């Protein structure tokens, strides 16, 4: 069901109520060109004080999920308050994420809405220069450093990452597979608890949870380009290297992947990645591959997720010495 413009106006006016003389004069709506799981709209908002705001409106209730995304995101795992809380935590951090203007959250049935800054940029997957990808890796390190040691308040929607679920996902992947693929996944499963133990020991921070190139907007109108990750619906507290593993997944050359990993390590700790860091990253690569392999066979991944995840799992398992 389409949200009424009058309801959008009321939500924004409520957010602006504390600022004298500020109110919404008009709203012009249009579809957002890079729509993902949830309905997204561009809003051109004219204010009564003469200013104009360019916003993005996102309707994040579970019932608003469409197509393959509804198969991939189980209701039991979807919490619309998670993305709202993540955007609130990012306010004032100086990380360049889209500015939060207003939220609406009325549990249990909703609505759940986000009004954020519209970024004039393109998804990272449309950018060919490696230095921009390295900048995204360095940005990620700054995010993780910023929230290292952060403890959410009681009742937070930002649940801790349960790395044991990747063992469950690996079990589902084995059930979906056949022939040689099933055999190799079963061999990986034999040593997988060692991977889980390693992941459980890693420091916790705010994790984006879906740090793939389609969720990272690049604004090249400024220099250096602004890195503005969006779509925080999978945010959680967990090992930061899960995000880096998502960024460097896929068909990269050894040189290109190493450059991004080095950019992250340098921004995070001021030096080159050591052997322990690289082993931790391989464990996170295997975890992510298991999660995606364990998704419903009815789910079709978006283009930047559509890698050879069996190959990714095998590569990581070999480097970890469990295959």
Image: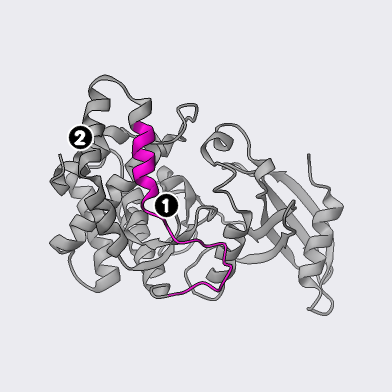
Instruction: Give the answer, above or below, for where 196 lies relative to 86.
Output: above
SS class of the residue under badge 1?
A: loop
Please give the count of numbered marks on the rendered protein: 2
Question: Are dots 2 and 1 in contact, CB under 8 Å?
Answer: no
Q: Where does the N terminus fall, quadrant-wise?
A: top right
Q: Looking at the rendering, which quadrant does residue 169 occupy?
A: top left
Marks 2 and 1: which is nearer the front?
2
Badge 2, how many Cα within 10 Å: few under 14, some, many 20+?
Answer: some
Residue at screen point 75% across, 68% down: 51
Residue at screen point 75% across, 53% down: 111
Q: Look at the image and tell me whether residue 128 can be seen.
A: no
Q: Left or right: where does residue 15 sit relative to residue 272?
A: right
Q: Which mark is residue 312?
A: none
Name the magenta segment's main secondary structure.
loop
Q: Look at the image and tell me whether residue 141 can be seen.
A: yes
Q: Left or right: where does residue 41 sit relative to residue 278?
A: right
Q: Position of residue 14 (x, y in %)?
A: 81, 68
The residue where tag 1 is placed is: 211
Badge 1, how many Cα within 10 Å: few under 14, some, many 20+?
Answer: many
Examine the structure image and report whether residue 271 is included in the region drawn in magenta. Answer: no
Residue at screen point 35% across, 49% down: 246
Between 312 and 19, the residue placed more toward the observer is 312
Q: Which mark is residue 187?
A: 2
Q: Looking at the rendering, which quadrant does residue 272 occupy?
A: bottom left
Q: Position of residue 165 (x, y in %)?
A: 40, 48
Q: Left or right: where does residue 137 sit relative to residue 230?
A: left
Between 291 and 189, the residue placed more toward the observer is 189
SS class of the residue under badge 2?
A: helix
Task: Identify the mark nearer the N-term, 2 or 1.
Answer: 2
Q: Position of residue 301 (x, y in %)?
A: 45, 34
Please report the bounds of the magenta region as a residue range. 150-173
Q: Position of residue 195 (x, y in %)?
A: 24, 51
């Amino acid at each position: 069901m389409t949200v009424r413009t009058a309801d959008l106006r009321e939500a924004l006016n409520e957010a602006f109520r504390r600022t004298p003389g500020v109110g919404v004069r008009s709203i012009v709506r249009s579809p957002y060109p890079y729509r993902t799981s949830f309905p997204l709209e561009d809003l051109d908002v004219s204010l009564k004080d003469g200013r104009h705001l360019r916003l993005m409106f996102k309707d994040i209730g579970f019932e608003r999920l469409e197509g393959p995304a509804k198969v991939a995101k189980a209701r039991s795992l979807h919490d619309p308050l998670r993305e709202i809380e993540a955007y609130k935590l990012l306010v004032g951090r100086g990380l360049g994420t889209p500015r939060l203007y207003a939220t609406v959250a009325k549990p249990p049935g909703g609505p759940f809405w986000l009004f954020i800054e519209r970024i004039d940029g393109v998804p990272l997957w449309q950018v060919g220069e490696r230095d921009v990808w390295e900048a995204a890796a360095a940005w990620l390190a700054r995010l993780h450093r910023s929230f290292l040691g952060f403890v959410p308040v009681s009742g937070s929607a930002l649940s801790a990452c349960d790395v044991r679920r990747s063992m469950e996902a690996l079990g589902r992947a084995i059930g979906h597979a056949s022939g040689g693929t099933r055999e190799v996944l079963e061999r990986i499963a034999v040593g997988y608890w060692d991977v889980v133990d390693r992941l459980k020991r890693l420091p916790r921070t705010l994790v984006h949870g879906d740090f793939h190139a389609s969720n990272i907007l690049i604004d090249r109108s400024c220099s250096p380009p602004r890195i503005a990750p969006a779509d925080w619906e999978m945010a959680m507290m967990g090992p930061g290297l899960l995000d880096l593993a998502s960024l460097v997944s896929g068909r990269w050359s050894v040189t290109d992947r190493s450059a991004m990993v080095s950019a992250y390590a340098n921004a995070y700790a001021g030096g080159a990645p050591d052997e322990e860091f690289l082993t931790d990253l391989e464990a996170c690569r295997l975890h992510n591959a298991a999660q995606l392999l364990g998704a419903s066979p009815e789910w079709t991944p978006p283009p930047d997720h559509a890698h050879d995840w069996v190959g990714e799992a095998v590569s990581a398992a070999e480097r970890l010495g469990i295959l």
